[in-house]
Image (cartoon, helix red, strand yellow):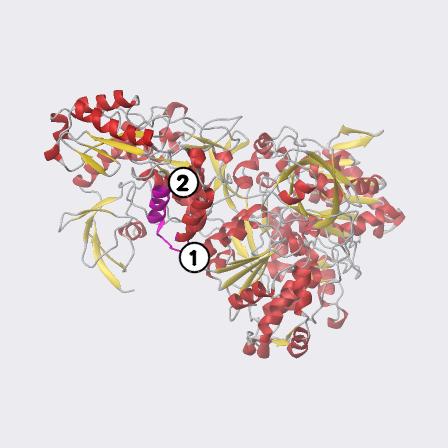
Amino acid sequence: MEDITLTINGKKISCQEGTSILNVAEEYGIKIPTLCHHHDLEPFGACRLCLVEEEKTGRLMASCVAPVAQDMTILTDSPRITKHRRNIVRLMMAEHPESCLVCSKGNRCQLRQIAAQLGVGETDLYPMPNYKRLEQANPFIIRDLSKCILCGKCIRADHELVVVGAIDYNLRGFRSRPATVHDLPLKDSSCTFCGTCVSMCPTGALASKNTQYVGTPEREGLSVCGFCGVGCSLTMGVAGEQVIEVNPSHRQDTVNGATLCVRGHFAHDFLNAGERLIRPMIRKDGELISASWDEALEIVADRLLNIKRTSGPQSVALLGSSKCTNEENYLFQKIARVLLGTNNIDNGGYSSGQRLLRLIDEKTDGGCRIHPLEQLEKAEAIFVLGANPDQSAPVVGYYLKRASRKGVTLIVADPRQTELADFASVWLSLLPQSDLELINGISALLYQKKAYDPSFIDRFTEGFGEYGDGLSSLDLERVTGVTGLDLDILEETAGLLNGKKIAFVIGHGILQQRYGMQSIEALFNLSLMTGSLGHAGAGIYGLARENNQIGAWDMGTAPHALPGRQPLNDVLNGDTARRGWERAWQAKLLPDQGSNVVRMIEEAEKGNLKALYILGENPLRSLPQPERVRKALESVDFVVVQDIFPTETAEIADVIMPGAAFSEKGGSITNMEGRIQTFRPVTSPPGEAKPDWEILFLLAAKMGYTGGNDSLEKIRAEIAELVPMYAELDGQRDVAWVKETSQRKLFDPGGKGGMIPFSSVVSTGDEVYDDIYPFTAILGSVRYHLGSGTRTGYSDRIGELGLKGEIEISPEDGINSGLRNGDMVRVLSPHGSLERAIRLEKRLRKGLIFVPLAVNANDAMNLIGLTELCRPESPGWKTCRVKLEKL
Amino acid sequence: MKPEEIDWGRLASVIEKHRDEKSLLIPLLQDIQETFGYIPPKSIESVAEAMNLFPSQVQGVISFYAGFSLKPKGKYVLRCCRGTACHVKGSRSILRVVEKELGINEGDTSPDYQFTLETVACLGACFLAPTMMVNRDYFGKLSPTKVTSILAEYRKDKEER
């Protein structure tokens, strides 16, 4: 690309060939009005407002689509241009209904802004309002196409950014409008209600549906989404102290760009729910009654210290939150380790397979911590296993679908034909829990073809010979038998991956399954063999379910790790990490690993756990076998719950302390990419609720702690100073990245960490099927809820949707079992049962049923047995054998 | 052709013929319209799947072109010219006669799916004004009696069959 020179409004400008006039002008601060242009969308040239004049030839051009040329002399504001722009706007106004008074877009309407700038008021044209019927039959979006100016932003956002394709232009001329297929209402179309079109719409044609407040927000504040681990950057519109509107932030270089998903865009109305906890409660004579902060904190401090004294530190456990900030989790584990002297601390991320991701961290010695999602679009090949990001982390789904559209090889291994499978070059419809065999099989085929990276293997790894022997002796017939896949399709997949660096995207299908640990090791081997680690656009991307799941682990809210993922117990290196923390905190730290959340429940059952402090988690809803968990927790002498809602767990607490939601406090969170985002409060907490860090600090003070940490800044400074991984969290910038601290040769050529070892090839055991439980139930997320659905369950909009969580079954099994759509069934597993309606789903294979999570108080967890995910013999939490009884 | 008579196997074979002909959506749609007389709305999804497009995009193309119809049409499609030359030569009366004879209005299809009546802006045969087309045959220098006899021919065709 050569540099060329031109003149815009008399200003000499040099720029690269191929750029549009509009982009160049914007770069030089020359403002040109636009309605259909958006920097994340392909130029379109629909609205013609960006007209400019080439002075020498007199040509008028739409600057968004006209490329610059040598020696152009452009005028952007000549009287001729202004006249044309005025005419365009006058024509649009003539077709526009006069509903500005009640339009929720208000003064943010771009048509209105541009009309004002051009001095177009009352037009003299004959008004021809183009009335269309108003659509508001869904809880999220109001569609009033009378106000549509046909800029096509909604359509292009739908096609280019979120790749759903629910709408396109329909008909022609005056009748033309964006429409769904067969002109169905949005809720009957393929629309996912991500709301990206709503944020893009320049007029009021598309608007968020609000029930409580209609109109323009009084002010806006930046925040980070409180739901999944993508951590989208948000702008929250506020009226009074209520968040009434959420849009993607206008900042560039965010993880989500101009997109969001239905949860991020519409489910934040949970913040305004009337059920929010607004004052501390304590249990007196079996009843929960209101109390003052002082009273509540006094009781918590006293009882915790008392129990520690009388029954020992091992009888106290703390469950931190994958939804609370880094600062809060840091403080929380410090209370556990320093004041209570226990490593019995975990966070909700346990259920999302944190222990398994730890394997990768250990093998690389902290080398693979950064996974920018934007690199996926530049990947050579993407292999998705056990993940359905379209539902669980939709913004990741957008990245994958965009990559596929750009021609990146996408391979999807999933027993279910997910939406993403339709975008895949190959969909591997393997049997549940057979990912390990699939990965081994593909590795073996690649090994046979010598499709590995010898120089990478030589320079950075060890043990390849042994691993190769393992692959050579792998029985491919057994692989096809266990996975249920033909050798042909495995060969085809290996062919597509041959010679490529691979980005693996894994979700709960791997992280929660029976052979999770072994699958991770096999994947790790495959990524070493193909040289995919340490390479941009490759590596292992683990989906995070909660927004600060990674941060909670990084901050040491885990039974096995100190902040910065440093080991508690590292005798080989003289326990340097622990000794360092002992010096920094001036306290003696226990070297032994504490209990994870499942062990906490088991200890409670044995009567060994006397006190449990739960911060922002709802184990009674999120863990398997909720009844068992309830009994266990009821047997604990003293349970403290710090939360924003009166959850199932809060109901059995002895003390409830009302915390603040993410938008009501400051802090930082770390997303699945390793991006640390700092945010400030947008509103204040309701009632007497307080930011969680403040509650934790007040509690620490009551417990006699005098080591500072009395402001967010001081906590943050301590983290930045003591945790090398978080050195960038210096309070100076809103976006920082975690540090990879590995000394392995791959990451640090001069480092002392040595080579990365291959693990040996292991196979799955043989599945034993019995006739009593003929079906395999797969539990999975739906995009309208997050996790166990505690917070999304308090969203009015999600509630109005009335999800029933129908059990999906293949039509074949449905007919064989005499079931029709809508029939009620009881699903029974060895652990429990649930009752729901049935839906025949032709995309599901025979022998499987799908049970959506989060709905009906997350009763899906009744079916699963509570076992430790990190034990090799754990059956996992993802699938179970079930039978159906028609009701 | 009545909508319930759609032969889905035949539709599938038409689509299969064009599969992998990337960016040749319009020939496929023409082929479907040729086969069935219109484009059955239920075929939009399968066409989109074969062409690797969104169904909404396929619908957008169909509804953009006047030549494509999502509604079933009669066996004979009458197109009365309402261009300037024909208008001067009395095409409005011709249209009225056709409407009265067939008992349907402009844009409609007769309940027995024999006739569809449309108007067009010009057939390019102004020297024959007033004109109309029935499927691919032109009729010029029309008069009410001529119209009646032409329509009778097509009706007879029906009775004979």
**Foreground residue, A2 or A743?**
A2
Q: Look at mark 1 in the image and give the residue it sits on.
A: A406
Observer-side mark, 1 or 2, equals 1
Q: Position of residue B93 (x, y in %)?
A: 18, 21
Q: Position of residue A299 (x, y in %)?
A: 80, 37
Q: Position of residue A557 (x, y in %)?
A: 70, 53
The image quarter containing residue A503 is bottom right
Vertical comparison of A519 with A470: above or below: above
Q: Residue at x 30, y 21 (%)?
A: B103
**Foreground residue, A628 or A668?**
A628
**Foreground residue, A863 or A696?**
A863
Q: CA distance from mark 1 to mark 2?
A: 20 Å
Who comes first in sequence, dot 1 or dot 2? 2
Element marked by disc 1: loop
Letter of the chain that mark 1 sits on in the rendering: A
Q: Position of residue A825 (x, y in %)?
A: 71, 36
- Quarter the N terminus of chain A occupies: bottom left
- Quarter the C terminus of chain A occupies: top right
| Left or right: A296, with A742 as reference point | right
Magenta-highlighted stretch: main secondary structure?
Answer: helix
The magenta region covers B18-35
Q: Is residue B20 magenta?
A: yes
Q: Is residue A543 magenta?
A: no
Q: Residue at x 81, y 47 (%)?
A: A601
- Amino acid at the residue labelled 1: Lys
Q: Look at mark 2 in the image and give the residue it sits on.
A: A154
- Amino acid at the residue labelled 2: Cys
